[in-house]
Structures are given as C-alpha cells and as structure tokens.
Amino acid sequence: MQKRSVGGIIFDCFNYLFMAAIIVIMIIPFIFVLNGSIVSEREFILSGGVILIPRSFSLNVYDFLFREGSILPSFFLSLARIAVGVPLSLLLTTILAYALTKKKMPGYGALMVFLVFNMYFNGGLVPFLLMVRDIKVYNTFWMYVLPSAVSIFNALLLRNFFNTIPETLSESARIDGASEFVILFRIILPLSVPGIVTIGMFSAVAHWNDWFTGIAYMAQDRVLPLQTYLRKMIAITGLQLDAMGATADMIPPLPDTIKMGAIIITTLPIICVYPFAQKYFIKGLLIGAVKD
C-alpha cells in the first residue's frame, strides 16, 4: 500500500470539512421548515419561526392541508404527469439521440445547427401561447406533456453515452439483418441503463418542479399540479386562508406554517425517490459528459 503524503492527508481533511459544511448549510433550512410545520402555533410565534429542536408536536397544518381538499388531486395529477410524460420523453429523446450518433446521415450538420439553435433560443411566450391554442392543447392535460416531450440537452447527453458503446456491436447485428430499431432497443438500450436513468431523472424532476405551466396555460378553477398548488399557497393571503378554512370546516393555522407544510409535502417524494436512482444518475451523467 502506497504511503500517503502529509499534503494529501491535509487536502482530504479539508475536502471532508468543506463538504460537511455544505451539507449542514443545505440541511438546516429544511430542518427549520420541517420543525415549523409540526410545532404548536404558540411555540412557532414565540420562536419567531426559527426552530432547531421542537418542544411541542402538532399535525394541525397537515390536517388542514389534506382536509381542504386540493392537495391530493394536485399530487395525483403530478404523478399522472410523470407517469405519461417521462416514458414519452424517454422514447422520443432516445430515438433522437440515436439518430444523432449517425454522423454520415444526410443533413446531419443542418440538423445539429437547428437543434443547438433551438436549445438556446425560442420564439417567446406569446407565439408559444398562440401555437398551443391553435393545436388544441391549451388548458388540457397534454399541455403538461407534449411541450417537454423532446429535450435537446438530454438527447445530446444521451448521444455521448451511446458513442461510448463499441460500434462493432451494431455492425454485427446489422450484418445479421437487424433493423435500426432492433439495434436500438435490443442492443443499445440494455447497455445504456445509467444514461437512460439519468435523463429519466432529469425529465421527472423537471415535470415535478414545473409550476409555470399550471399558471400560464391552465384555467385556475381546475385541478393544478402540486408545484403550482405550492406556489399558490406561498402567495396566499389571510382572506384566502380564511375562505379555505371555511371550506375545510376548521380554523386555519398560521399562514407561515401552512406554507412550510406545503413545502414539505411537495419536496418529500423527490427526497424519497432520489437515493434509489443516485448511483445510476452519477454514472450516467459522468459518462455522458465525455466529449467526442
């Protein structure tokens, strides 16, 4: 075993301390939000909303949010959006990424210029609004799915991942009579699980965190995604909260505790899912980032 230098040991210790400090800085605000949503109103007021170690316990905030009746439909709408949007995005993005590996394809250069240009520039909000209205997806469920069905960034990332797979595998299958779809779905994709999981996570997080679509392209009197619901709760006024309390047939908690409870509910699913996909996420991101 090679003996490590003193400088290397000091460098590692500095890195560990630095990363530990970053973890603490990131976790403490979340702890404040969580504790603020589970303590009594009296403790919350006396502490000014900054609670590191709670001395009381109350689930009135979560009881109010679930009895109000909007959060569960919003949660299931966000799940449905992910269940439809992520597979569709994976399918179309994978096909585009595989096509981009064919540098001898006619029009390859023009296609790359077109895709890269559209990745950085768009027509603006008003033309996009007119387009989705004309194609009849405005104020429908497909508004959540179709505009983000193809991600150029994810396609380029997955293309780099595909380029790490030896071309000889595809050539052997092509000699045996396999079509391009057979090569893609029977050979390339089974070897690209980390890359697929990576862009799947990108797509799922983008769908989960998107609140703007529900605000800009959906009627506000219908069920909205969970993040749009969270945004409305953060901007809620005292009069609106009283009206929600009348609907839930209970006295509403403090507005700040309501906001903290909504933040916890919308954040918890991603926190639970991410650790299981983390190893694929890191591996796929690093391999897909290798430049040709």
Image (tube, helix red, strand yellow):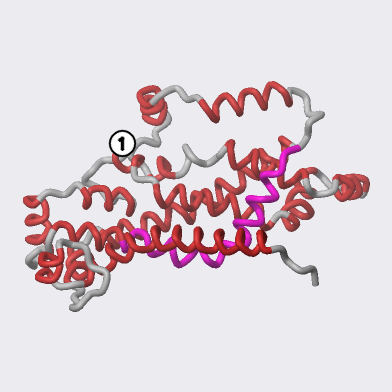
In the rendered structure, does residue 210 fall within the stretch colored magenta? no
Seen from the viewer's position, the closer of residues 231 and 107 is 231
In the image, which residues are magenta?
264-292
The residue indicated by pointer 1 is 216
Q: Residue 15: where, in percent of width, then height?
A: 56, 59
Q: Is residue 232 left or right of residue 277?
A: left
Quarter holding residue 73? bottom left
Q: Is residue 271 left or right of residue 211?
A: right
Quarter holding residue 254? bottom left
Q: Residue 242: where, in percent of width, then height?
A: 7, 56
The quarter of the image holding the N terminus is bottom right
- Which residue sits at x=73%, y=66%? 4
Position of 120 relative to 52 (above/below): above
Q: Residue 57: where, in percent of width, then height?
A: 20, 78
Seen from the viewer's position, the closer of residues 262 and 178 is 262
The quarter of the image holding the C terminus is top right
- Which residue sits at x=59%, y=48%? 90
In the rendered structure, does residue 281 fall within the stretch colored magenta? yes
Position of 188 relative to 55 (above/below): above
Mark 1 surroundings within 10 Å by alpha-carbon count, few (fewer than 14), some (14 through 19), many (20 or more): few
- Which residue sits at x=23%, y=67%? 51
Q: Residue furthest bottom?
A: 56
Q: Residue 150: where, in percent of width, then height?
A: 56, 39
Q: Secondary structure at mark 1?
A: helix
Quarter holding residue 61? bottom left
Q: Does the magenta stretch mainly form a helix, a strand or a loop?
A: helix
Q: Residue furthest front?
A: 6
Q: Amino acid at mark 1?
A: Ala
- Which residue sits at x=53%, y=49%? 202
